[in-house]
Amino acid sequence: MNLLEPADSLPVLVIGGSGFIGSYLVEALLAGGRQVRVLDFGPGRVRHDNLTHWAGSFLQQEILQEAMTGVGTIYHLANSAMPREANRDPRRDCAENVVGSLGILDLAVSRGVRRLVFASSGGTVYGPTAEVPIPEDHPTRPITAYGIGKLSIEKYLRLYDGRGEAESLSTVSLRIANPYGPYQNIAKAQGALTTFCAHAVSGKTIQIWGDGSIERDFIHVSDVARALMLAGDHTTEEARATEINIGAGEGTSLNTLLDLIEKILDRPVAREYLPGRDFDVARNFLNIERARSKLGWAPQVSLQDGVAELLAHFQSQRLC
Amino acid sequence: MNLLEPADSLPVLVIGGSGFIGSYLVEALLAGGRQVRVLDFGPGRVRHDNLTHWAGSFLQQEILQEAMTGVGTIYHLANSAMPREANRDPRRDCAENVVGSLGILDLAVSRGVRRLVFASSGGTVYGPTAEVPIPEDHPTRPITAYGIGKLSIEKYLRLYDGRGEAESLSTVSLRIANPYGPYQNIAKAQGALTTFCAHAVSGKTIQIWGDGSIERDFIHVSDVARALMLAGDHTTEEARATEINIGAGEGTSLNTLLDLIEKILDRPVAREYLPGRDFDVARNFLNIERARSKLGWAPQVSLQDGVAELLAHFQSQRLC
């Protein structure tokens, strides 16, 4: 490999590229004219001549090694299990996801990869906090094994920045808020917003833990995909060995969200308020100034437009 | 095991109890009338009727399980390798020390252990920082795999606090500064202060990286042992699921230290100033207010007394 060849002319590897965020990222990369490789169990929903699929897991060193050869940029979006499963066996989660991510980092160094972008979690690395919007320098006190694993991986990314021949590897972690959009897996309860829209369209009662006043940071998946692409291409000093929040930058209460859904549908939706859960913090949304200044990124899809699109998506599915 | 039996009437397990800090802790526990078990490779320097030794590593689940049975309090002071070795293979360090510590936590929960005290590292978890003395809430940006591992383990300790039958397990991490004192292993270059004293007594030239103005937080090992004991016995709400700095609370420059050694010996010592290392931060010392308020702990051995004792120790060794 010619070290002077620009990284953006080399193939890109998306680990976890068949998942919700991964598929949008892969589409965006392909639209940008990139050669894309995906390492994931299934092939996902995207098909394209410039897309190749390696069937497997990042825990399989041989496949990982093969998929990584000749690659300029890696996006690491994979997780060996669902977030809530991590708490049942933190030791296994750490042995798989944290140690496994170090396996990716070690191979990235030995294979001469230039850029590694990690999808971290803005909703879990901080833990309960009084200060909103939350800046990246806020103390991190995750209360789930999933959040601890993400935070540990972030620290290892910082350590590996500048490793490799000619100090070639640069790294960055994006702390992504609550993404939503079409094709999110509601069976796995991945996102409140997407689940609410699906239930509103199908007429199923929407269950809310607590009084609906808790505020969350909902960000459209296409904005997340664009942030990841930008993070892959920005390899300047200021956008490496750091963490960058990716969110709407403002909180939306569950009640405000439900009111918006009713307004767009122009009819009431059935709500059921359940007792609050003590692990739900009142307000959680991210300060996104760093993304603006370091990546030139800001969200483009308003909540109004994103929710309207998602409702239309579920309505079209019902008509099929 | 009777859950109402006070934890301090049960045996105590010190994992890594044959090491530098471990041996002082074991002595202090025995002096306090406790039944002490040590899990470590070698038997260490302490001998006592109330002390039993399990030969092995915390990575050996069966020995660990056996040593832990019936124990009320665990002190986890072990590390599978030397700090500087971790950077050569962070993946292995994580797989052994972080995953291994989760093995200790899982067993502590299943065996009904009440209290787990972890020896973390005040010198490495924060990374470079402009603010001194460093408070526990300061952002943590470790620049070594050793520091990242310690920080990750701290987060898992918080997660496990309150687990176990009747939510019986409580946890706390002590972020220990630079300990010094007799019996520290200078062959492994574990501490600048101890090495300086040894060389000053033997007449060997003392090498200083940089101009000697960098400040560190030196704390006598007996003060560290007392802090660990207090942390084991304080299981109130305020002293659990948290991190507590243990240090002198003030910085001492290497030059000040050398001047003190010369004053006590009443003769000059040979110094050689070498080029500075770029990973040495200028000033690193800990804010110890939390230790005062939550544990009622403060250092008792002054630097003057500690250095004088250590010099006398090396002088008596030469006379043997």
Image (cartoon, coloured by chain):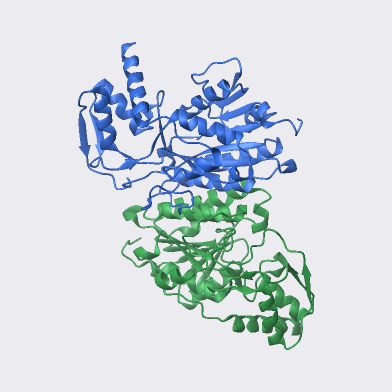
Chain colours: A green, B blue
Residue B227: horizontal and vertical position, in percent? 51, 34
As displayed, is residue B195 above or below residue A197? above
> Which of B39 and A34 lies nearest the eye of the viewer?
B39
| Left-right relation of B78 to B192 | right
Residue B148: horizontal and vertical position, in percent? 47, 47
| Left-right relation of A319 to A172 | right
Residue B293: horizontal and vertical position, in percent? 53, 43
* Residue B228 appears in the picture as rendered: yes
* Residue A35 appears in the picture as rendered: no
Quadrant of the rendering where the C terminus of chain A is positioned = bottom right
Seen as rendered, the residue at the extreme top is B320
As displayed, is residue B94 above or below residue B204? below
| Left-right relation of A19 to B254 | right
Residue at screen point 75% across, 81% down: A201
> Which of A146 and A114 lies nearest the eye of the viewer?
A146
Residue at screen point 33% across, 33% down: B192
Classify residue B184 by image quadrant.
top left
Seen as rendered, the residue at the extreme bottom is A266
Q: How many marks?
A: 0
As displayed, is residue A59 above or below residue A273? above
Residue B110: horizontal and vertical position, in percent? 71, 38
Classify residue B262 by image quadrant.
top left
Quadrant of the rendering where the N terminus of chain A is positioned = bottom left
Residue at screen point 67% across, 29% down: B71
